[in-house]
Amino acid sequence: MMFYIILALGIAVFVGVLGYIYRVFALVNLSKNSGSTFERRAGKSAYVNGLLLIFMFVAGIAWILWYTYAEADRYNLPEASSAHGPAIDSMFWTTTVVVFLSFVITNALLFFFPFIYRFKENRRGYFFADNHKLELIWTIVPAIVLAVLVLMGWKTWSNTMSEAPQGSLEIEVVGKQFNWMVRYAGKDGKIGKHDFRQIDDDNSLGMDFKKDFKTNADDFTASELRLPKGQNVLLKIRSRDVLHSVFLPHFRVKMDAVPGMPTSFWFTPTKTTEEQRAELVKLGRPGAADFDYILTCTEVCGNSHFAMKMKVTVLEKADFDKWFNEQKPWAVSNKEYLQKKGINVSGLALN
């Protein structure tokens, strides 16, 4: 990779040096032929400069296309591992193609026009104050294209951000400087209430056992995010301090974690970690055999923002259920803490 970057910089410097050398010779030639016609002195320079612009444009586009193709397997995300992911990818690539074509067309005009309309002795410029037909074209065409993109995006957004289906697995994801914390709803399927005033060294999530003991009683925490393949998952997202952003790139999931304003995102994982590893190994991706899904923060939240990550593992439904049933509720592991807080735990069987 570094070799190609150095090669590209070397070529750019070489072309730049050639350009400067040409300009020096052009100035020398201009001084020697000061008595010649303006056509002879300026026409040749305009011709060569115009060709150089065309060359730079073609070389630049060729470089972009080659680099995109050559490095696609290394840097592009693999196919989405969620049910809604393909729709997000379709929107992304549609927008990318439209923007790239617009870029190529507009820059082709910018780089080719200096050559096509270069100086000629008998050519005169044509000036016009306005052209209603041109203005209609460059107003209506982009408006139609943007309207189509907006409608496609609205449809995809509406489907992706719809209400989570009944029976979705509820998981609370809480961000704080500089790590993620997760809490799973227990067998009742509901995440218990929380209160920031209950947060301390032991109860880092602020679970409110005084107001909602029954729902909180069977919730449990985990050091990594584990998900079942093929089951709807509802992430209930919040922040404990500053603005964070939940990002699961392989699942095309992104949602801000805002202090004081709970957010959510539901999705359905479609590939286990092992299945994704096998696909990446087949593609020849570096480090594919050790691949893990990841939950990371995409909102700069402080000095150690870069380290705010959590491992994510997707399991087959049966394996996930086995792991889920083996987990001990947080309240069971912290009975003494709850008793010190004046919480009566004798009324519920938590074992």
Image: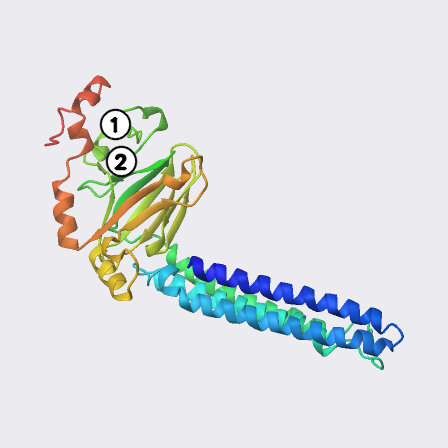
Question: Which quarter of the rendering shows the C terminus?
Answer: top left
Q: Are marks 2 and 1 in contact (CB under 8 Å)?
A: yes
* Percent x, y of residue 177: 38, 33
Secondary structure, mark 1, is loop
Mark 2 vs mark 1, CA separation in Å: 8 Å
Q: Which amino acid does label 2 sit on?
A: Gly
* Percent x, y of residue 258: 43, 39
- Tell which circle, 2 or 1, labels the residue nearer the N-terminal end: 2
Q: Which of 78 and 259 is in front in this view?
A: 78
Q: What residue type is labelled 1?
A: Phe
Vertical side of 6 occupied by 52: above or below: below
Residue sticking out furthest to the right: 35
Vertical side of 282 occupied by 315: above or below: above
How many neighbours does mark 1 have within 10 angstroms: few (below 14), some (14-19), or many (20 or more)? Answer: many
Image disc number at residue 148: none
Q: Which of 220 and 178 is in front in this view?
A: 178
* Percent x, y of residue 72: 39, 65
* Percent x, y of residue 158: 42, 58
Q: How many marks?
A: 2
Secondary structure, mark 2, is loop
Can you tell which quarter of the image residue 215 is in? Answer: top left
The residue pinned by badge 1 equals 209
Vertical side of 348 occupied by 292: above or below: below
The residue pinned by badge 2 equals 192
How many neighbours does mark 2 have within 10 angstroms: few (below 14), some (14-19), or many (20 or more)? Answer: many
Can you tell which quarter of the image residue 104 is in? Answer: bottom right
Residue at (45, 66) in percent of width and height: 67
